[in-house]
Image (cartoon, grey):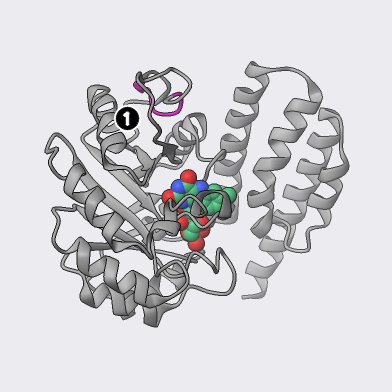
Amino acid sequence: MNIYFAPIQGVTIAHYRNIHAQVYGCVDAYYSPFVTTTEKRSASKILFKDIFPDVNDPAVKLLPQLLSNNGIHFREYAKWIVNMGYKEINWNIGCPFPAVTGKKRGSGILPYPDMIKKFLDEVCKDTTFELTVKMRLGFQHLEEGTKVIELLNDYPIKEVTIHGRTGKQKYEGIADLDAFEHLYNLSNHTIVYNGDLFSYNDYQKIKRRFPEINSFMLARGILRNPALAYELKNGPLTVEERLEKLISFHDALFKHFEERSDAETYLCNKLKGLWTYLSVPIDPTGMYFNQMKQCQTIVAYNDIVKNMLDAYQLNETSQQHLL
Ligand SMILES: Cc1cc2nc3c(=O)[nH]c(=O)nc-3n(C[C@H](O)[C@H](O)[C@H](O)COP(=O)(O)O)c2cc1C
């Protein structure tokens, strides 16, 4: 089984991926958040700041992602990326955010198969890298995704990741497995499943329905429980093991932020961002996270984290005794 860590803009950036891999491992590849192609003439340090090999641990497999609706621009960017040593590039045609889709990028390109054909005719002339695609069911309708998946069959694409929502749906509701199955059955390519995998039970449900799928891309599931990839491959950790790894993960991220700035507001804001996801399973009522949102000092922050983890441990241990 392959587990891919899906990209989350602003969160799964180099330091996060490096630290996650060091503490937890078990992710077969991390996708970079997208870089948008434009008519740039050079590979600037800022543009590729998250992709340059010097910020990425060489032991961590990174797959760069581009957001583009222009094959010539994509090839230009691909050339720079290949020069950095990468051999595979992901094309994002799934992003649902209106600022992106309004420019016929991300899932906003899905209603335009002619644009997609023109793009792929250009990009697939280049054989110096392998192309993968990340898409949704359509922008508004499954018919759009249907035309696109049939079109993709004509091109040499290594893998196609399908997220089971339309662009218009953004992250509302649940992933539509019937619609996913429809596209899966039409594709000649290797399909990667993406959408709403938060637990081993979620994974089993998908594996039972699609036994031939071997690659799974997860985002929010791993952000909430960074041990999830490890647990899907090796079975559940004990409460103590889970906490020990979580504390190592947290402390390494804390140290990283602290090295960048020791201003308390900066540090508190970065750490609160982290707990937006991490607190979901640890603090199901949201009581501690609400306290954290108000805190302005690291002393207060550390107190809340300690109380939250103590309460989690107590609660989980007492539940285990009841079983
Ligand atoms: C805030 C946010 C930023 C995201 N950024 C990207 C991105 O840069 N590239 C991309 O392909 N997907 C992006 N995604 C989508 C995720 O990679 C993933 O496909 C989505 O969260 C569904 O997977 P999940 O149900 O496992 O969370 C983003 C999602 C969110 C919520």
User: Is residue 295 among the parts visible in the rendering?
Assistant: yes
Q: Amino acid at mark 1?
A: Ala
Residue 124 position within the rendered picture, expressed as x and y whole percent measured from the top left: 16, 45
Task: Identify the magenta region.
Answer: 49-53
Q: Is residue 293 above or below residue 19?
A: below
Instruction: Determine if the magenta segment contains residue 52.
Output: yes
**Apparent side of residue 21 relative to residue 288 in the rendered image (left or right):** left
Question: Is label 1's Cβ within 8 Å of ligand 1?
Answer: no
Which is nearer the eye, 154 or 111? 111
Q: Please tell me whether the stretch drawn in magenta is mainly helix, strand or loop.
A: loop
The answer to which of 76 and 48 lies nearer the viewer is 76
**Above or below, comparing residue 173 to residue 303 in the picture:** below
Badge 1 crowding class, 10 Å Cα cut-off, few under 14, some 14 to 19, many 20 or more, is few
* Residue at 60 percent of width and 31 percent of height: 253
Which residue has dot 1 on it?
59
The residue located at (43%, 22%) in the rendering is 55
Q: In the rendered image, is residue 242 in sight?
A: no
